[in-house]
């Protein structure tokens, strides 16, 4: 959404009108650039899996493989790229709905402990198959948060999924803290590859990836954190990240409880 506010100056302020118009033109230029950059990114992101699909279906159709094993490998690639394409389209759709303010939230009083435990159950297999340790600290009673349960789960699923994908060995730590009044703080921390300090400010941007090829290999679309941030913000929370390269990454989300434990 672009809001343009024009203030008409007095006669003797024509100079400042000229400056204002100039500034507006610069802003519009930037807006146009970021939009066309966005569309360029989308078409690039869609084109890549399409190219794989086209290439490997051609190979299979023409019988250009040397063994059944090779054929299976190509089929696997086709399947993986199709899954990625579906995810990409779903993520793009979700993001554009949120950006247009068209997302409807199903708000109710939510128990964050339940949301997090549910999300952890879903990623349990991935955690185990990578041999990662999980430590969880959730207080016995967590104040309720007024939010959309499914969207909340999406937030934690995305963060946990990233933590697992970008950690080769060690630990994923999930903590819920109720020490501060009127807020619940949740932390998801991993002992993974980390993010270089100079890249940290950009990781919530659409399609921003520290290493494109690494993210692709790990099944990423570059939209997960953009979605997380939007979902957190539209539900009144805030999210912060800190990281050190080679050591791990920590995401902290602050939710407000409105000071009341029960609705
Ligand atoms: P992707 O689908 O590529 O994972 P995201 O939007 O979820 O996209 O994340 C953006 C980028 O931030 C990733 O490509 C990755 O480089 C980096 N990143 C996100 N989470 C982590 C993490 N837990 N550890 C290290 N790097 C991360």
Image: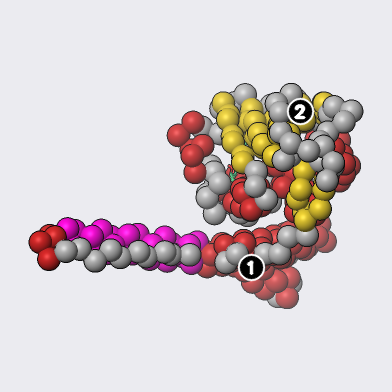
Q: Residue at x 77, y 56 (%)?
A: 107
Q: Is residue 22 magenta-colored?
A: yes
Residue under the image location 72 percent in, 47 percent down: 155
**Front-most of 150 and 75?**
150
Q: Main secondary structure of the magenta part?
A: helix
46 or 69: nearer the viewer = 46
Q: CA distance from mark 2 to mark 1?
A: 32 Å
Residue on which the image places disc 2: 178
Q: Quadrant of residue 168?
A: top right
**Coloration mode:** secondary structure
Instruction: Residue under label 1, please give it.
Output: 102
x, y percent for residue 193: 62, 31
Q: Position of residue 211 (x, y in %)?
A: 54, 43
Q: Is label 1 in a helix, a strand or a loop?
A: loop
Residue appearing at x 83%, y 33% in the figure: 142
- Secondary structure type for disc 2: loop
- Looking at the rendering, the stretch of residues picked out in magenta corresponds to 16-41
**Nearer to me, 14 or 25:** 14
The location of residue 178, given as percent across then percent down, is: 76, 28
Q: Position of residue 1 (x, y in %)?
A: 48, 65
Is residue 50 highlighted in magenta?
no
Instruction: Indicate which quadrant contains ligand 1.
Output: top right
Residue 52, quarter of the rendered image: bottom right
Q: Given the current orientation, which residue lies at the most extreme bottom position?
A: 61
Q: Residues within 10 Å of mark 1 (few under 14, many from 20)?
A: few
């Amino acid at each position: 959404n672009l809001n343009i506010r024009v203030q008409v100056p007095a006669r003797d302020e024509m100079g400042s009108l000229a400056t204002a118009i100039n500034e507006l033109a610069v802003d519009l230029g930037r807006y146009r650039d970021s939009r066309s950059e966005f569309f360029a990114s989308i078409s690039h992101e869609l084109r890549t899996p399409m190219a794989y699909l086209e290439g490997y279906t051609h190979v299979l159709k023409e019988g250009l493989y040397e063994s059944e094993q090779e054929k299976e490998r190509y089929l696997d690639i086709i399947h993986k790229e199709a899954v990625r394409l579906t995810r990409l389209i779903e993520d793009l759709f979700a993001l554009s709905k949120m950006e247009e303010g068209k997302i409807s939230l199903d708000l109710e009083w939510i128990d964050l402990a339940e949301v997090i435990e549910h999300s952890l159950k879903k990623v349990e297999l991935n955690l185990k198959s990578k041999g990662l340790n999980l430590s969880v600290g959730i207080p016995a009673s967590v104040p309720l948060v007024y939010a959309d349960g499914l969207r909340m789960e999406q937030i934690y699923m995305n963060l946990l999924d990233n933590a697992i994908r970008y950690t080769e060995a060690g630990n994923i730590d999930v903590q819920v803290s109720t020490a501060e009044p009127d807020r619940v703080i949740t932390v998801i921390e991993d002992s993974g590859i980390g993010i270089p300090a100079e890249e940290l400010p950009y990781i919530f941007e659409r399609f921003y990836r520290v290493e494109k090829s690494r993210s692709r290999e790990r099944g990423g679309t570059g939209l997960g954190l953009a979605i997380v941030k939007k979902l957190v913000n539209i539900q009144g929370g805030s999210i912060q990240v800190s990281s050190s390269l080679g050591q791990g990454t920590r995401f902290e989300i602050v939710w407000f409880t409105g000071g009341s434990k029960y609705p």
